[in-house]
Amino acid sequence: MTAVETINARKACDLLKSDPKTLLVCGYEGDEEFHQHHLEGAISLHDFLSRKDSLAKNTPIIFYCACPHDEAATGQVRKYQEEGFTNVKVLEGGVHAWKEAGCPVMAMA
């Protein structure tokens, strides 16, 4: 099994700014969780699934969640590694680390 790579929030935020091909994907299956934990620039898992087949296998993809040990994001990374994606990472510390790093979040309506 391929090791799951992580990326810290500051590097992830910088990568999203510098590389428009990078996808930040919420690792939860439900839309409610996506809206509750919506980081600026992120797409929902549903949106990712609708695009997945048209993506190059080396597309930079960062999965995140709000789990204490990044469980949901890690599960998604493993799943897409098995499907042949080669540049998938877990946002280390997820939503909480993102906010602590001062990276932008979407305002709740």
Image (cartoon, rainbow, N blue to C red):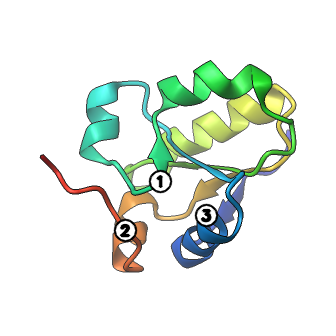
For this view, does 36 lie left or right of residue 11?
left
> Are the residues flagged by discs 2 and 1 in contact, CB closer than 8 Å?
yes
Identify the amino acid type marked 1.
Answer: Gly
Identify the amino acid type marked 2.
Answer: Pro
Residue projecting furthest to the left: 109
Q: Residues within 10 Å of mark 3 (few under 14, many from 20)?
A: some
For this view, does 10 lie left or right of residue 15?
left
**Disc 1 or 3, which lies upstream in sequence?**
3
Q: Which residue is mark 1?
A: 41
Identify the amino acid type marked 3.
Answer: Leu
**Disc 3 or 2, which lies upstream in sequence?**
3
For this view, does 88 lie left or right of residue 103?
right
**Disc 2 or 1, which lies upstream in sequence?**
1
Q: Which residue is mark 2?
A: 104
Residue 107 in percent (x, y) is at 21, 56
Q: Residues within 10 Å of mark 2 (few under 14, many from 20)?
A: few
Picture quarter with the N terminus = top right
